[in-house]
Amino acid sequence: MTYENPGVAPEPARSRRRPVILVTGIVLAVLVMAIGALVAVNNFTGQQKTESLSALKGDHLNALGDARGKVQPAANAYLAAYKKARNAPASRDQAMKDSQKEKDEFQQASNSARSALQELKSGHDSADTPVDVAVQQLIESHEDYFDYMDGLVESYPQFEGLFRDDEAARCNGLFVGSKASTLRERQTLLAQAAEPCRKAASDLLQSKNNAYVEFARTFDNKVAELQERAEVTAKGEENYTEFVRLKDDLVKRAADAEARNAPEAEVQKIADDAKAVNARIRANRSEFDFAAKRYLAGVKDMPSTVENVFAKEISADIKHFDSVIPTREQILKDTIDVELTAK
């Protein structure tokens, strides 16, 4: 039998729900704090990105545009200074010294523009977003432009000196027609002038300026064609001398046959030989005329080939850059606007 002490109250059972509620409360509090921190970080990151995109569209693009705008005038100033020195006249080395100030100023303008481009590029090296892609396209067009202008300045002495009397290339020695008494002599003098001239054209092929490169390639082909046609005309002239000898021999044979009342077979043989010689003369004349006309056309065309490098090719290339770069700038601005609107 169990006895209870009526004077003592029973001890209440300890609650097991309180620690669980406490832990749950702590977890919820931490979770709320984490969510709040995450929202704050996201808001801060979003604000940073908005500011970054706004700076990209405004300050960075404006700085790049201002820097790029100084490159071409600086290049033009150098080209003018160098050509003025050469026309003084001065040697290539002296002209380079006399125009060094303008060249340094161009280099400073080019370096500043490239630095502004790097500022624009910073943080957009990947192609993860439409903005990154638009930045990369704009960078490519600027790099092409800056390389083009660097090549325009750096290779100008090589281009400008091709037809200077004091240059090693001496390409004006290609036009030796009036100095030669025979076409073979012309061919020989042309070959002597062509060797260093074509070497100079080959050196110009290494330029970063595409107009110079295309000119060098075209120029080399034209010189090669002049050499080939000079050889054909020289050979034609020599053949003509041989044909005169053959003609005289045939006339002598015919006169002798007639005097001897030679057999018909012998007379026919002389006639056949005469036809063969006439056929060779016609073929030689055709080849000679074709080569001579092309040779003269090549000589007459050479000055315009040189002049068109600046008058047409470089002018067209710069117009291309002046069209492409602003278009890609606008694409980048529009892409940034879309990105900002989506936030």
Image (cartoon, rainbow, N blue to C red):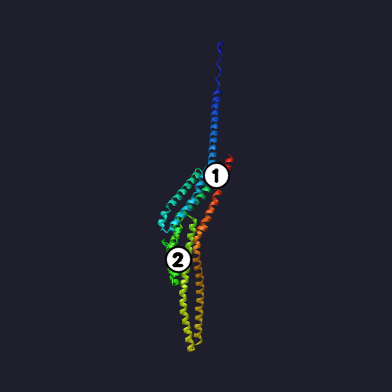
Q: Residue 202, percent across and down?
A: 45, 60
Rendered residue at 50%/80% (across/down): 274
- What is the secondary structure assignment of the residue under circle 1? helix
Image quadrant where residue 57 sits? top right
Residue holding disc 1: 131
- Quadrant of image for the C terminus: top right
The quadrant the N terminus occupies is top right
Q: Which residue is mark 2?
A: 174
Q: Is residue 20 left or right of residue 87?
A: right
Q: Residues within 10 Å of mark 2 (few under 14, many from 20)?
A: many
Q: Quadrant of residue 6?
A: top right
Q: Are marks 1 and 2 in contact (CB under 8 Å)?
A: no
Q: Camera-side residue: 151 or 108?
A: 108
Q: Is residue 338 above or below residue 152?
A: above
What residue is rendered at 54% in x and 41% in y? 54
Type of amino acid under label 2: Leu
In the foreground, 77 or 290: 77
